[in-house]
Image: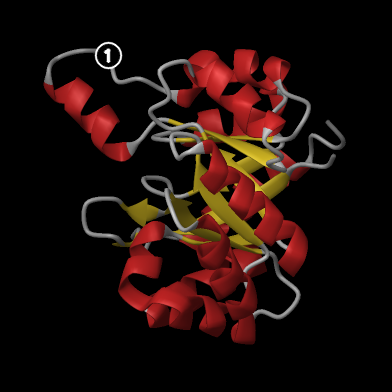
Amino acid sequence: MKPIVQISLDLTSIDEALETAAMALRAGVDWLEAGTPLILAEGLHGVRKLREAFPGIPIVADLKTMDGGYLEAEMMAKAGATHVVVMARAHAETIKCVVKAGKDFGVEVMGDNMICEDMVAGARWLEDLGCDYVIHHIGYDERRGIAAMGHRMPSPMDQLREVVQAVKIPVQAVGGLSLEQAIACPAYGAPLVVLGAPLTIDADAFRTADGNLEASLRLICEKIHAYGDI
């Protein structure tokens, strides 16, 4: 598949999310993500507003579902999401329910292996349960906590090749990537590149980063799309 660039709208204001999304699409971003902070702040309303403003653009609802999988996926699908996120650490039945809702309502399911004891096995398990994509994810708090103890901050790049080799479905790496690492993801066999905190969002304030973000995003998109089919 051709590389896909997704921007994570980890914002708490729908107005700022809409503005950032429009700028990102002008720059060449392919998918929009209603990040968890935006969903917490705006809920279904935020997803609906994104869908109204950007018809035809894939929208990922980063629900991080842990329970009530069918209902959560159904609600987001009806609000306009095209993709929903379920956690590998949820019960198997929850993942199966999200997958069933995905089939019933025409949305694709992204399984997130965050905090799995074995990240590679977690990715494989998500595929076995019917997920369409794997999100290989090192969480924000985990990264900051480990760094605060004076240890090297973990990165999803550490095991990205192993995760990619373990599954047949597309993989996305998430969690503290530098711009260079994000751009390199397709070279690791991970065609879904997500740009979010801290690349485009001020991670501590959850607002759009300062600077000429549109020009930077355009350059990033050009480099990622230049990989061609993976």
Q: Quadrant of the C terminus?
A: top right
Location of residue 113 with respect to 30 vertically, above or below: above
Residue 122 position, x and y percent, is 54, 24
Residue 212 lies in quadrant = bottom left
Tell me, yes or no, if residue 30 can be seen here.
no
Q: Residue at x 63, y 71 (%)?
A: 77
Asked which secondary structure carries label 1, the reply is: loop
Left or right of 227: which side holds 87? left
Colouring mode (rainbow / by chain / secondary structure / one colour): secondary structure
Q: Position of residue 30 (x, y in %)?
A: 70, 59
The extreme front residue here reads 93
Residue 69 location, x and y as percent? 52, 56
**Up-down: is 168 above or below 102?**
above
* Left or right placement of residue 23 versus residue 178 in this view: right
Dot 1 alpha-carbon crowd within 10 angstroms: few under 14, some 14 to 19, many 20 or more: few
Q: Find residue 180 and report its horizontal and vertical position in percent.
A: 53, 30
Q: Is residue 153 visible?
A: yes
Please state which of residues 116 and 202 is positioned toward the viewer in this rendering. 116
Q: Residue at x 85, y 39 (%)?
A: 1
Q: Which residue of the protein is positioned furthest toward the left in this rendering?
A: 149
Q: So how many labels did they put on this image?
A: 1
Rendered residue at 45%/50% (across/down): 196
Residue 70 position by quadrant: bottom right
Q: Residue at x 60, y 69 (%)?
A: 74
Front-most of 76 and 138? Answer: 76
Name the residue tied to disc 1. Answer: 152
Q: The disc labelled 1 sits on which kind of residue?
A: Arg
Up-down: is 95 above or below 63? above
